[in-house]
Image (cartoon, rainbow, N blue to C red):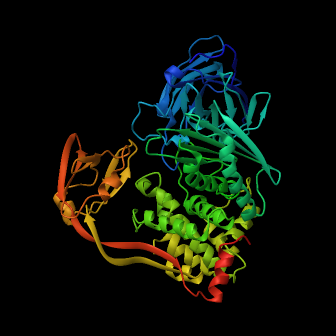
Amino acid sequence: MKFMSIFLILTLAVSIHAANSKLELKYEIDVTKIESDSFDVTMTVKGIMSDSIVYQFIATSPGMYAVADAGRFVGSFKAFSTSGAELPVYRSSTNQYLIRNSIQLAKITYRVEDTYDTAIKENLIGPMGGTNIERDNAVINSQMVVGYFKGYQTNPMQVTFRYPKDWKIATALPEKKGVYYADSFDHLVDSPVLLGKLTEASLKVRGARIDVYCYSEYDVIHADSVMSYMKGIIESADKFLNGLPVNRFVFLFHFRKNTGPIIGALEHNYSSYFYMQENPVSQVAPLMTAFAAHEFFHIVTPLNIHSELIEPYNFEKPLPSQHLWLYEGVTEWAQMMMRVCGGLIDQQQFLGVITQKLKISDGFRKDVSLQELSLGSYGELNSQYQNIYYKGALTAMILDMKLLELSKGKTGLREIIKKLSKKYGPKKTFSEKNFFDEFVAMTYPEIADFFERYVKKAEPLPLKEYLAKAGFDYNAEIRTGQYKADTGKFALTVSGENQVVFIQVDTAHAVNRQLGVQNGDIMLKVKYQDQEAVPLVQNVIQLVNSIQTDSMFSIVIKRGDQEKVLTAKAGKKEIVETHKLVPIENSSKEQLEFRKKWLSNR
């Protein structure tokens, strides 16, 4: 691409105060090296009084719930003295550079690879938290580009960029004359940046400014059409919360035709970044509004309700919190409730959301509690993490109904969240260890038993009992007496290398025994009659659903270094309707009153 000869210069200046020293740091980030798929970073520094200092890149960051190791993407790291001489630098770990003779340090330079197009294929960074640089746009999640000197994480920063003059820049960071200000490294990480050929739209809701910026690869979606949907979300949140706890919020949307298997959004306190497939806005609207409602509610938790593990955040070493049920489960519950209470979805659609979450949750382990899932999210239970958005939201839903029952309809989870938000707020943290007890003290003794059984342990939720209180009949399974082809009993997951992998293979199942499929096999292709489908590229589910009883089908898999064709004859199994949820005919007055209090703004 031919660039304009005049560029806006992005400078990141940081004033850091230690007990006996004050540092002046200035970063310059070059977003014009499109051919290299990299960001060039230059930092100048004054005031270091120590003989050595460590420059730290993040191991993880808020909202990722996985190890990122940003240092993997860094290269050509050099340090220079005031005279221009190169200083000794030692890479002490993946994410740390030790600089010797740092009392002479004047400048650091390095290059950071774009994570969207990286050659690194292990532990891929989700696009919502990564970086991208292309001919007409760039995405910067600062945790993957900028580091900090150890011991100076909590100090203010000033931020500017080098980018083409005909581009726009969008971020929630406060700005004055092209300079962007962050209170700390945490604040900078909390503020993603979208640059490029963007459209924009703004509105105000009860004094709060809402901005929408869109990059659309083929110019299919514009910010004004997205804003028409965001307006409903913000107004619903305003009613749900009885006021918005922020003065400004920025929605950053990146729409592209081929997203790969992962789409979604990453929460921030004053903005959210969305990575979604580019289709007509009417097609993406249902998922987009669900994502937006979830991300927007993060202005409550963790912005106003969080433990000491969240801020200041430990970027060097992942420290899992046991309260993901609050940060993500309650937030996902809130997006459901905001939409139904605000009239964005009707009762039947709301029941459909519940049913969908129940069905998706069935694909995860039943023996893992929300507390265990939270604490194991960075390790062996990372594959179970997504269940926080399903089981976690459903648990919050029953907690809400339990609170309404105990208070005779006066106080639900929404009211408790608002009380907690008022008690703590952005600057005060709750105790990671004692929060369950504090929540119980604020509510009812019976809630201690609820936490013990359904958050700390993995007991089945009392769905039938509580949904009946609102006049809904719930059945986990209903046998239909009808049959369909049985193509095996297993689950599939997408690995960090974007491969579809078999998990939870039932080795006793008859069709599985014919196939010989094993846990860890990578699905390459499904073949039936003269048709075939490649996962993540074509509709495998549609092809599998077309398979007839007693007919032959094949699955091409990769096991180790070998490619194998697994073949079996489809069996026969009864069609079982799962998680059937319908209104009870002739619901009682008490049930209808409970339903009204549950599904309306109070």
Give the vertical position of 547 relative to 407 (above or below): above
Query: Which percent across, then down, holds residue 295?
Result: 62, 52
Left or right for 411, reference 36 = right
| Residue in front for this viewpoint, 223 or 139 | 223
Q: Residue furthest right?
A: 207
Classify 244 as above or below 102: below
In the image: residue 259, left or right of residue 228: left
Residue 500 relative to residue 369: left or right: left
Nearer to us in this view, 31 or 433: 31
Residue 42: horizontal and vertical position, in percent? Answer: 62, 21
Q: Nearer the viewer, residue 274 or 40?
A: 274
Residue 239 position by quadrant: bottom right
Q: Residue at x 75, y 29 (%)?
A: 179
Q: Quadrant where the N terminus lies? A: top right
Q: Residue at x 44, y 73 (%)?
A: 579
Q: Quadrant of the C terminus?
A: bottom right
Residue at left 40%, top 62%? 364
Q: Is residue 117 visible?
A: yes
> x and y percent of residue 596 in the render?
67, 78
Q: In front here: 469 or 94?
A: 469
Q: Position of residue 85 (x, y in %)?
A: 59, 11
The picture quadrant where one finds residue 167 is: top right
Count the marks: how many? 0
Residue 461 appears in the rendering: no
Q: Residue at x 59, y 73 (%)?
A: 399
* Res 547 → quadrant: bottom left
